[in-house]
Image: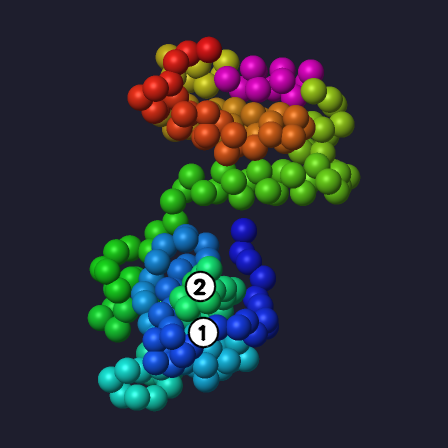
Amino acid sequence: MPQQQTNTIMEIDFQKSGGLVPAIVQDADTRNVLMLGYMNEEAYRKTIETKKVTFFSRSRQKLWTKGETSGNFLNLVSIKSDCDNDTLLVRVHPDGPACHKGTDTCWGEKNEKNPLLFLSELQDFIEKRHEEMPEGSYTTSLFKDGLNRMAQKVGEEALEAVIEAVNGTDDRLIYEASDMFYHLIVLLTSKGLRIEDIARELTERHSDGWKKH
């Protein structure tokens, strides 16, 4: 989910490296690293004030706001320092490519979001439904119907996915499997569990020392 913008002025150790600190720029949504720049205290404060990421150019010896000529601004979402207060992590929403050569990142990589991240976002949304229980929501109706009904829906959708896998099309399999995942996340939410708990279990099973319970 998008993070909130911050106006907090932190205590940064600009003097450790001659007045400059590295600023790692990360897309707040995709979590991909876009570029690395350097900030002095003035650039840092201007970034906080304008919400447009500003660096100090070591070659030109002056401030430059990313996008001031290209229009490819880096819109500030959040900024924080590391444990030594001498490196910044700057999360942004980019307006176009981050690299001056026209690529999404300065490493020539595509700034694409991993679709698996949406599963966490979906559960965040479902948890909000669980907290607010708005009328007219299908998710709300599942929570109101109780644990047995939610478990039953997971089984029904799993059976539908099996049927499509055996006798249907790939598109229908994906459709029914999506229904199954949605209802499973609803069930997990009702039990106070997360989809990440399943990911951790599968990660553990993938390790060399794992043994079946």
Residue at figure coordinates x 23%, y 60% from the top left: 107
- Identity of the amino acid at label 1? Asp
Mostly what secondary structure, the magenta segment?
helix
Residue at figure coordinates x 22%, y 60% from the top left: 108
The answer to whether residue 51 is visible is no
Label 2 Cα crowd, 10 Å radius (few <14 / some 14-19 / many 20+) = few
Element type where label 2 sits in the image? loop
Residue 117 picture location, percent across and down:
45, 43
Name of the residue lying farthest toward the front: 16
Marked residue nearer the N-terminal end (2 or 1): 1
The residue identified by callout 2 is 84
Q: Find the magenta span and give its range.
A: 148-158
The residue identified by callout 1 is 13
Name the one closer to the observer, 180 or 63. Answer: 63
Label 1 Cα crowd, 10 Å radius (few <14 / some 14-19 / many 20+) = some
Residue 42 picture location, percent across and down:
46, 84
Element type where label 1 sits in the image? loop
> In the figure, 85 relative to 174: above or below?
below
Residue 109 picture location, percent across and down:
25, 56
